[in-house]
Image (cartoon, rainbow, N blue to C red):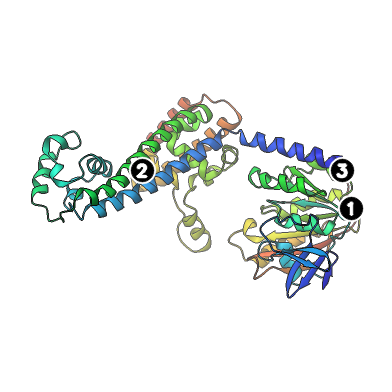
Amino acid sequence: MKDRKKAIEEARKKVKEAKTERDQLIIHSIKAVEEMDEVFNLFYERVENWHSLHFPELPEIVKNPETYLHIINELLTRPEMKEEKLKQHTPKAKKIEKESKKSMGAELDEKDLKQIKRLAKLAIDVKNERNEIEEYIKDVTKEVTPNLRALAGPILTARLLSLAGSLEKMAKMPASTIQVLGAEKALFAHLKKNVPPPKHGVIFNHPEVRKSSEDNRGKVSRSLANKLAIAARLDYFGDKHKGKEMKKEFQEKLKKIRG
Amino acid sequence: MEKFSNVFLINNKLYTKNLVPGKKVHGEKLLNRNGKELRSWHPYKSKLASAILKGLKELPITPGSKVLYLGASTGTTASHVSDIADKNGKVVCVEYSEKPMEKLIPLAEKRSNMLPVMGDANKPKEYTDYCQDVNVVYQDVAQPNQAEILLKNTRFLEKGDEALLCIKSRSINAVEEPKKVFEKEISKLRKDFRIKETLELKPFHKDHAFIRCKKKSATSP
């Protein structure tokens, strides 16, 4: 059948076209970032539990996972943790040195602890690479979805796109759907049972929604979702330079809501 | 036992005669019977297979059929339809999204009666060129307007031609009772079709109904 050859060729061409949509890059990037965060937390927990055999007091003093991992990576054993070396990592250097001397952890030698260092190093690398990807997201969103970016910031934009599936789908979504993207469980609970509807999905991560009082949060997220829906449509179909204007409108609306 | 032509039921398991002997499509089992190679057909993976196991009385897809397959996805069921339609048949596989299309194209390249089309089943005009001689429509799209999609695609059918339709109640209304959803969809189909059979695909597929219907009269496109 000569029709068949033509059909196959056409389908191939269309798949290729679909793959060149830039929004898919953003979606894969943000998913990678989310997965790397999970991996980082997993590794950090393991390092913390593992190293606590040797120095259980350290995580109590250094609460920040990244700082903790840097310390483990560079100064593995308790005797190595001297104030002057710790200084570059944390202001609590003096306390760490003091605690290290009277720690109730086991005396483990270099050979045992070296294995922990491997994992710590890996976790730090994961974090660094993750940050690189985040930078990349900040960059691509500027080019692909400038209006959304101006309103929601690069990371939230990427999350919304990944939940919607593509910029095209998001552009065709009603604002009310955008408002509850990421709160599907609560939404379906509302539709099925007699429970109140969710006020926000991932939109909650927007600083303006988050800092609003509980009474206003629904209103704020609704008007944000409205603006986001318009922004997505503009990004997909039309003028990419309305971001600033829309942000201003949103700010004014906020003022009204907050009275 | 040959249940329908090219469809076999052996020990309560379904098989279709392999169009491309020696080639598997989705990791299924191959079986040799009287010099024919059979491909096993899983009811949990394919709605058509489960409909046959649930007692579908007639299968409009026969050797030589020209099938319009809407919602072909990666081609699991479509490959079996292509088995049944055999060398003289034709299966036009319409799929909307690009991801399953990646798998469907290589499959179509191997099967001499399969035509992949990347298009929207809502817009039959996009693929009219390939569908001039179509006489069966098989539709399995998980869309909220499933019945409307079938009605739009009846333009390819003549009076008396049959269509198979799989309704997923969850994609029409996730909250409503599936039975009510089915009834509503069926009543929409009555406009152009006479309903011949309705099956529920429990336990193979949850909240799915399978419908065989016959076109009433020619409609203007």
Which residue is denoted by mark 2 in the rendering?
Answer: A210
| Quadrant where the image shows the N terminus of chain A | top right
Please tell me whether residue B52 is drawn above or below residue A88 in the rendered image: below
Which residue is denoted by mark 3 in the rendering?
Answer: A1
Pointers 2 and 3 in contact (C-beta within 8 Å): no
Please tell me whether residue A189 is drawn above or below residue A232 in the rendered image: below
- Is disc 3 surrounded by few (<14), some (14 to 19) or many (20+) residues within 10 Å? few
Task: Identify which residue is drawn at 16% across, 51% down.
Answer: A57
For mark 3, name the chain: A
Q: Quadrant of residue A17?
A: top right
| Quadrant where the image shows the C terminus of chain A | top left
Viewer can see residue A259: no
Q: Quadrant of residue B64?
A: bottom right
Task: Identify which residue is drawn at 59% across, 41% down.
Answer: A169
For mark 2, name the chain: A
- Is disc 2 surrounded by few (<14), some (14 to 19) or many (20+) residues within 10 Å? some
Give the image location of residue B163, x and y in percent.
Answer: 82, 58
Q: What amino acid type should be assigned to the residue bearing mark 3? A: Met
Q: What amino acid type should be assigned to the residue bearing mark 1? A: Asn
Q: Residue A114 versus residue B220: which sits nearer the camera?
A: A114
Q: Secondary structure at mark 3?
A: loop
Please tell me whether residue A230 is drawn above or below residue A200 in the rendered image: above
**What is the residue that sits farthest to the front in this orientation?**
A111
In the image: residue B199, left or right of residue B192: left
Which residue is denoted by mark 1 in the rendering?
Answer: B88
**What is the residue that sits farthest to the bottom in this orientation?**
B11
Q: Secondary structure at mark 1?
A: loop
Choose mark 2 or mark 3, whichever is in front. 3
Give the image location of residue A7, x and y in percent.
Answer: 79, 40
Give the image location of residue B121, x and y in percent.
Answer: 74, 46
As drawn, the label of residue B137 is: none
Choose mark 1 or mark 2, whichever is in front. 1
